[in-house]
Amino acid sequence: MVLPFRRRSDGEATPPSATDDDLAAILDDGAASVATTSSEGEAASTENHLASSALRVVETCMDVRRNENVLIVCDPTTAEIGAALHEAALMRSDRVLLMLMPKGRHHGQEPPAPVANLMRQQQVVIAPTRFSLTHTKAVRAALAEGARIATMPGMTLDMFQGGGMSADFSALKQQIARLSNRVRRKRIVNVRSAKGTELSFEVAWRDWVFDDNGICNRPKMLTNLPAGKAYVMPREGTMNGTIVLDGSWEGTLIEEEVRMTIEDGVLTNISGGEMAGRIRRTFEEIREGLRPKDRDLLGTVAEFGFGMNPAAILTGNLLEDEKCLGTCYFQFGDNTSGGGNAAVGTTFSCVMRAPTIQLDVEPLFDDGRLLDE
């Protein structure tokens, strides 16, 4: 269902069509909640920060300007968040469109054609959805047309109202920007942990990405929210060692440590308890659907990064887990977005607590603590 552009001076809501009654009810409930909060004051109460979080996204993160075209894309799982963002955006622009699309089936699934077409016509796109739109053709096409985009895959009401979303994103941007000098001309990354992680790999230092800071205020910019991480693609074939996971795997908290062996940049063995078996089965199921020549590439270490958001909480939701200050993460699978050769079409991510990270001979993190320059 599409809610048409609406000006603040309008006194009447657009009635939904008969075929969209159920979806409209979801949105109406969310909009009613936001309206009640707004009538009680600009600042949200301690019980409900939905409206203030939406304003933070619109004003601080996206810097929506007067009369910009703004598209909010949500699905039935995020309709209340979409409604709050819609109301907040109307405070900054008269041209705000809210679109409720069907829930996707997996990360990276292309949105319906009407959504993709509308995305290309906007200055601002904000997409809280159950599954990620970040790496879709629709997002790339909208970016090429000059849109700035924030995606929020897996966003929940609890996450939206606190945790990493409550960070001072302006300060976070400055802190992440300072990392660029620390990685300059550093080629070797070493990662260790008290629980047994010990691995080393090479990077091209110019490939580090420091844009995931929550500020998305210029054309063709893309961010995830909550934001707050720095990351890089390891040079293919260079990572060797052992990862001991004790944080989360694909949105599930790890209760029993999982050991992963990496040889020449590829995952070769997984051991541990029940979670290790679950991870092995996931890889095996995906491998069966790949061409024989691509099956071994599924274990490619596609990305390494570390969290920088001091407000983020490790809860088992991957969107926020990767951003937690004092953690690092590894992504396996498709690395083509970073210029790699593992075109397997899917990725898996896991988070490790309290890493010690060294760049060449310079320590960056010590047992999860970010060291001063």
Image: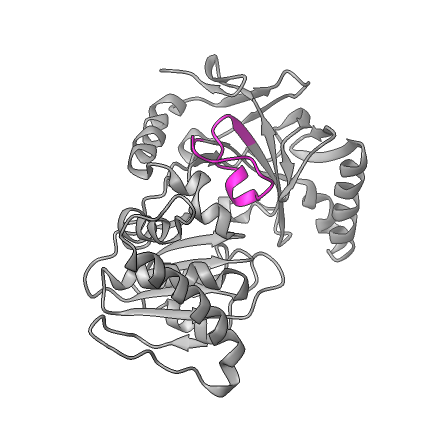
Observer-nearest of 243 and 39: 39
Left or right, 116 with reference to 265: left
Answer whether residue 212 is visible to the viewer in this image: no
Left or right, 100 with reference to 272: left
Q: Which residue is drawn at 50% across and 60% down?
A: 78
Q: In this view, does 223 lie above or below 81?
A: above
Answer whether residue 60 is visible to the viewer in this image: yes
Identify the residue at the far top of this view.
361
Q: What stretch is highlighted in magenta?
A: 308-328
Where's the C terminus, which quadrant?
A: top left
Q: Is residue 53 highlighted in magenta?
A: no
Point out residue 197 in the picture as x, y percentages from the top left corner.
Answer: 65, 21
When asked about the image quadrant of residue 302, the answer is: top right
Observer-nearest of 120 and 368: 368
Q: Is residue 324 highlighted in magenta?
A: yes
When asked about the image quadrant of residue 176, the answer is: top left
Q: Residue at x 51, y 74 (%)?
A: 23
Observer-nearest of 274 and 147: 274
Q: Main secondary structure of the magenta part?
A: loop
